[in-house]
Image (spheres, rainbow, N blue to C red):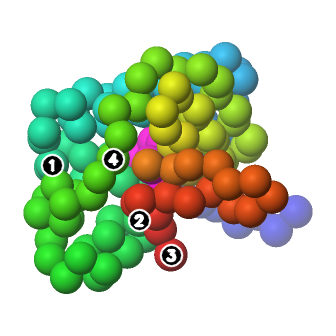
Amino acid sequence: MSGRSYGPGVMAVVLLATAGACATPAERRDAVTAQVTRFEQALDAEQPRRLCAALAPTTREELEQSAGHPCDRAIGEQRLPPAGPVRHVDVYGEQARVVLAHDTVFLAHFPTGWKITAAGCRPRPQRPYQCEIKGG
């Protein structure tokens, strides 16, 4: 053993990083479902700031770059379908997929919680999903 000492800041980061990994599968599914529900509520209420806050950083950047303006304006230009009720939730480690009646949403886990990486996604036979909003 090296005898190296780590300060409280390092230990806090380690604890936060491992906290999400310690959640039960049911807790992870519940957290993913709650994030998608909040996203859909913000969509229904036409609250672009809340929608943008729910996006993963690279997804938000991709949206802004492709639209040529800030997220809160760009997200309003997207044609996201009314999603309907949740039909199925899959969580694979730090990634998740939520299948709704009329949409599929993908998420990733970050230190700040679950964030949307793609939305407005439709399956295509033997090809990747086609998504209205997606990260690079």
Q: CA distance from mark 2 to mark 1?
A: 14 Å
Q: Position of residue 133 (x, y in %)?
A: 40, 60
Relative to 78, 76 lies left or right: left
Q: Is residue 37 visible?
A: yes
Question: What type is the residue that disc 2 sits on?
Answer: Thr
What residue is pinned by disc 3? 136
Q: Residues within 10 Å of mark 2 (few under 14, many from 20)?
A: many
Question: What type is the residue that disc 1 sits on?
Answer: Pro
Q: Is residue 62 magenta?
A: no
Residue 24's quadrant in the figure?
top right
Residue placed most toward the observer, 16 or 88: 88
What residue is pinned by disc 2? 59
The residue drawn where x is 75% and y is 53% is 125
Labelled pair 2, 4 in contact (Cβ < 8 Å)? no
The residue drawn where x is 11% and y is 63% is 73
Relative to 11, 72 lies left or right: left
The disc, 3 or 1, on the residue closer to the chain's N-terminal end is: 1
Element under disc 1? helix
